[in-house]
Image (cartoon, rainbow, N blue to C red):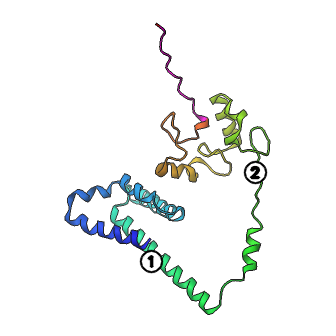
Amino acid sequence: MRRFAHSLRQCLTAMKRIPQLEKLNDDMEILRLVSKLAERTADEWTSIVVRIKRKEDRYPKFEEFVEFISDEAEFAMEAIKSRSLREETGKTEPKTKRVLQTTVVKTSRPKCLFCKRENHSIVECYAFGRQIESTKQEFIGDKELCFSCLKPNHAFRECRSARYAIINTLQACVYQNTRHSQLLATTPKPKVKPRR
């Protein structure tokens, strides 16, 4: 992270002398850089972007991104120093606490919300996939599922999958160029060539 921050600071310095580097202020260029970050760091950057867009109705500049990455690199270094200092003084947390935390995790497969079977999720459900588009949309609306990841308890606007679709095109539909689960799309009909 420190090397990445250092490289970005060098680009920022060069930007003042080389006008062509102004393209680094473009939001798509910054998104390319964000795609290289760890998930937690990318989430934090996304929250900064949302805050700036709400307050100032603009996308953050490259300089703001560099400042964010520099702060994250500094934070990571301080965390490492703090952890090693605790280990040296023998004040580490007992390992039994970690074991207790990991035993709470449930490992069973999710139950399908559509066919009610326990060996797959709705995204993998053959019966759901065979339904027509209007039936799928009606079911998702009735069950209040997210239109991106098809999971309950959050709306599309809060969906992490939808947020990453902007950066990584994860849940983006290949058929309709919009951000929703591909299961909800009507696939284009193949063009049939006339016989001669």
Q: Residue 138 or 136: which is nearer the viewer?
A: 136
| Label 2 crowd bin: few (<14), some (14–19), many (20+), radius 10 Å | few
Q: What range of the chain is rendered magenta?
A: 184-195
Name the spot of residue 49 as percent of width and height, x first.
44, 59
195 in relation to 110, above or below: above
Q: Secondary structure at mark 2?
A: loop
Q: Nearer the viewer, mark 2 or mark 1?
A: 2
Dividing the picture into quadrants, the one containing residue 13 is bottom left
Q: Amino acid at mark 2?
A: Arg
Name the quadrant of the N terminus: bottom left
Q: Amino acid at mark 1?
A: Glu
Q: Is residue 194 left or right of residue 116?
A: left
36 in relation to 144, above or below: below
Rounded to the nearest angstrom, the CA distance separating label 2 from label 1 is 39 Å
Residue lying at the far top of the rendered structure: 196
Dividing the picture into quadrants, the one containing residue 150 is top right
Q: Residue 149 or 139: which is nearer the viewer?
A: 149
Q: Secondary structure at mark 1?
A: helix
The residue labelled by disc 1 is: 74
Q: Main secondary structure of the magenta part?
A: loop
